């Protein structure tokens, strides 16, 4: 098994990232390293420049995100933790894949449509070709499994399409790239905003009340949960009763994911309760789950040298693992490189 996944180092790690992806990263690290496989987790700093950004903030957020991931349980001794900017093979492979990716495929990407909005002419080319870099990120390491939240499934399907077409067009009977499978958690694959149950929880939402950050203190968490939008009905006693109740569905899903149980189980215990009783229970569960992570994060973020060393070592290991696939892709395309082909 080769597990590969990434996160953009823009802003804080929030509950959606944690439940949708990072918790699964840690789980897979524990399973995969015990069975002789390899996990690679990276900061998608090259993806972050597809939107307007402040360079000094990106550098600071990159280091903070390393601290956050380690605080969540990513162990740099067992997993390869690095940033794309230190592994040029990502951008090289992206260019090689640009010949295979189709305009029509990229035009269908919902994230492109959402982020470009009505101003497509003014969007960066990086925003448009972003999913090709994402394909390169995983194909470069022959990833077999990619743990992501629900919103990244479409990008992973594109990576599979690109890999398949490249193998067919240029593989000469052999598989240059492995087709990766997305691993999406059964509960909490899409955590929604606390202010709007139809919008996903996101770093780019201007309202901080819309999300729980992993660094929020106990009072802030309790306040955000208390103020979370809900409807006036009590909780139903089974999952069918959540139909059409986006905010209730979200809060119950978060509870289930944090408690390590199912939505049905949460409703068996809390069905009939109003939000006046359920919200404090959810708030306490959040505080209890996140406090140890926040404490560790605060310790780690101070040691800039240690964080840079983690990235330097992880990047050296990633460069080494990437080399054979990159060479194979150049060769498959008939590109001559000083005797390497
Ligand atoms: P990013 O940085 O937006 O999010 C990182 C991970 O968190 C998940 N996630 C969520 N899950 C559930 N509910 C939410 N509200 C929520 N918000 C975010 C995302 O699904 C993701 O798994 N393009 C990617 C980064 C990337 C990548 C890759 C991922 C670049 N290359 C290669 C996997 C493989 C992104 O912007 O994720």
Image: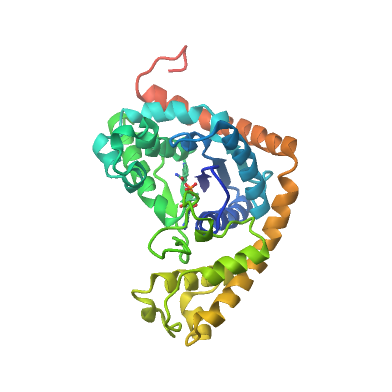
Nearest the viewer among 203 and 71 is 203
Residue 35 image position (x, y, % from top left): 60, 52
Q: Is residue 311 left or right of residue 96?
A: right
- In the image, residue 288 sits, relative to residue 61, either above or below, namely below
Name the colour scheme: rainbow
Residue 199 image position (x, y, % from top left): 40, 59
Q: Is residue 68 visible?
A: yes
Residue in the picture at 31% in, 42% down: 161
- In the image, residue 81 sits, relative to residue 170, either above or below, namely below
Residue in the picture at 43% in, 35% down: 50
Residue in the picture at 63% in, 72% down: 284
Quadrant housing residue 80: top right
Q: Residue furthest toward the top?
A: 338
Nearest the viewer among 333 and 237 is 237
Nearest the viewer among 263 and 236 is 236
Q: Quadrant of the C terminus?
A: top left
- In the image, residue 289 sits, relative to residue 47, either above or below, namely below
Residue 220 image position (x, y, % from top left): 63, 63
Picture mark count: 0
Quadrant housing residue 329: top left
Residue 1 image position (x, y, % from top left): 52, 48
Q: Residue furthest toward the left?
A: 104
Residue in the picture at 51% in, 44% down: 6
Q: Is residue 175 visible?
A: no
């Amino acid at each position: 098994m080769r597990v590969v996944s990434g996160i953009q180092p823009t802003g804080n790690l929030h509950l959606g990232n944690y439940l949708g992806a990072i918790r699964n990263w840690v789980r897979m690290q524990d399973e995969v390293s015990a069975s002789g496989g390899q996990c690679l987790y990276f900061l998608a700093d090259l993806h972050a420049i597809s939107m307007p950004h402040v360079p000094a903030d990106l550098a600071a957020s990159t280091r903070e995100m390393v601290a956050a991931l380690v605080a969540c349980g990513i162990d740099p001794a067992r997993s390869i933790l690095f940033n794309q900017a230190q592994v040029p093979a990502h951008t090289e492979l992206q260019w090689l894949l640009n010949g295979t990716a189709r305009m029509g495929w990229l035009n269908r990407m919902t994230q492109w449509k959402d982020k470009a909005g009505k101003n497509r002419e003014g969007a960066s080319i990086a925003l448009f070709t972003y999913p090709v870099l994402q394909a390169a990120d995983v194909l470069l390491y022959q990833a077999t499994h990619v743990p992501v939240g629900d919103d990244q499934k479409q990008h992973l399907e594109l990576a599979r399409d690109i890999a398949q077409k490249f193998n067919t067009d240029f593989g000469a009977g052999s598989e240059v790239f492995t087709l990766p499978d997305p691993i999406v958690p059964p509960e909490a694959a899409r955590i929604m905003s606390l202010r709007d149950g139809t919008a996903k929880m996101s770093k780019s939402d201007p309202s901080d009340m819309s999300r729980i950050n992993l660094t929020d203190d106990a009072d802030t968490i309790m306040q955000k949960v208390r103020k979370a939008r809900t409807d006036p009905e009590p909780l139903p006693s089974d999952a069918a009763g959540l139909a059409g109740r986006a905010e209730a569905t979200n809060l119950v899903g978060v509870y289930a994911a944090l408690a390590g149980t199912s939505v049905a189980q949460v409703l068996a215990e809390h069905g009939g309760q109003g939000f006046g009783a359920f919200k404090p229970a959810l708030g306490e569960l959040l505080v209890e789950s996140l406090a140890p992570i926040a404490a560790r994060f605060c310790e780690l973020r101070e040691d800039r040298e240690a964080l840079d060393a983690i990235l330097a070592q992880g990047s050296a290991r990633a460069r080494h693992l990437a080399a054979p696939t990159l060479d194979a892709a150049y060769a498959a395309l008939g590109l001559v490189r000083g005797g390497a082909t």
